[in-house]
Amino acid sequence: MITLQDVKAAQENIADITRVTPIFTSEQLSEVCGMEMFLKSEHLQKTGSFKIRGATNKVKQAVKEGAKYITAASSGNHGQAVAYIANQLGVPATIVVPVDASECKINAIKAYNGKVEKCGTTSAERLPRAMELAEEMEGVFIPPYDDPLIMAGQGTVGLEILEQVKGVDAVLIPVGGGGLIAGNLVAIKESNPNVKVIAVEPEIAQDTYLSILNQKITAIPATNTIADGLRTSQPGELTFPVLQKYLDDIVLVSEEEIRNAFSFVMERMKQLIEPSSATTIAAAMHHKLDLKGKRVVSLISGGNVDLEKISGLLK
Ligand SMILES: *Cc1c(COP(=O)(O)O)cnc(C)c1O
């Protein structure tokens, strides 16, 4: 299992690439939630999500060990982040995306000089292809979450939160494969065990919720939640034990609650965040938490939304 030292090492390793993102507050949001709310703004991170943190930590190590080629399997934020950092380090990258990936996501990868290969519609088809490509080209495949360097990189958000929000009581974090929350659990709990860390998941993508309940990794069928960064079908082999060790609570939010939160942040706070991030605001706005009057950070994980989809996401 990774440790606080690994997260601190990652922080040093990625500092020349990533931004220390700002914290937003809103009196209106705090009032609606009945808590003092702070938004950690990874939607303003390079490449539009926190994924650049883990990707940078991992790709730098691979290049240091002689990698001449990088691959990943993702149409979303992980793919963009890997393409960006590979380009920065001068190593060619191929990102394997589903055949139905949106033009806008493909263009974002290409804008970072990433090569795009289309393959199938599921991650079960994309992952082996990206691994095979890496092998053929003597390159390195960069996994999206289930990797110690990726987890440690994502955990650097938590170190910043502890610096930026003095006296924080709780941090709300969305869960897909669990790399973001696992890294942040280690960063936060091993720095200050009194800070509560709470996971948020869509009701219709409740694989981590069920896994915690069953005390073992539990898979769900494919889901089409609007929180497209959280559509993974099960938590990771490496991420899940960290959740079992440190997680204080996990709560579920409905699609409608996610839309409400997305619309509130857009209309009142003038911020474009993605539905995956709106889940944490939704949990606070719809009183899923027992944190009345507390200082609560909502980890806004990203802000990449296809512009033509925005009106469909509003309530
Ligand atoms: C990847 C992603 C998540 C989930 O992160 P995991 O490490 O897979 O749990 C949440 N929000 C956004 C915006 C993401 O890109």
Image: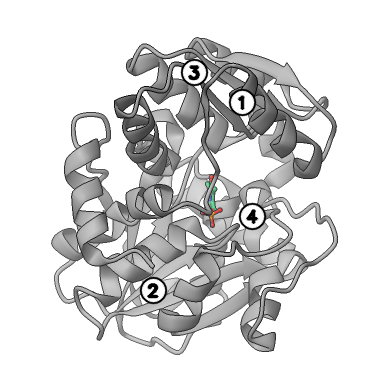
What's the residue at 24%, 75% (across, down)?
190
Asked if 292 appears above or below 43 in the picture, the reply is: below
Please state the horizontal and vertical placement of residue 81, each as a whole percent of the image. 46, 31
Q: Nearer the viewer, mark 2 or mark 1?
A: 1
Q: Earlier in the sequence, mark 1 or mark 4?
A: 1
Q: Earlier in the sequence, mark 4 or mark 3?
A: 3
What's the residue at 56%, 45% (across, down)?
274
Does the numbered disc 4 mark a residue whose Cβ is under 8 Å from ligand 1?
yes
Residue under numbered circle 4: 230
Q: Quadrant of residue 119?
A: top right
What number is the disc on residue 135?
1
Q: Earlier in the sequence, mark 2 or mark 4?
A: 2
Answer whether labels 1 and 3 touch (C-beta < 8 Å).
no
Q: CA distance from mark 2 to mark 4?
A: 28 Å
Residue under numbered circle 2: 31
Q: Nearer the viewer, mark 1 or mark 4?
A: 1
Q: Amino acid at mark 4?
A: Leu
**Please, what secondary structure does the residue beneath circle 4 have?**
helix
Q: Earlier in the sequence, mark 1 or mark 3?
A: 3
Q: Amino acid at mark 1?
A: Glu
Assign the N terminus to one quadrant of the image: bottom left
Q: Nearer the viewer, mark 2 or mark 3?
A: 3
Q: Earlier in the sequence, mark 2 or mark 3?
A: 2
Q: CA distance from mark 2 to mark 1?
A: 53 Å
Answer whether labels 2 and 4 touch (C-beta < 8 Å).
no
Assign the C terminus to one quadrant of the image: bottom right
Given residues 9 and 162, the one toward you in this image is 9
Direction from residue 220 to residue 280 in the image, left or right: left
Q: Amino acid at mark 3?
A: Tyr
Q: Amino acid at mark 2?
A: Glu
**Please, what secondary structure does the residue beneath circle 2 have?**
helix
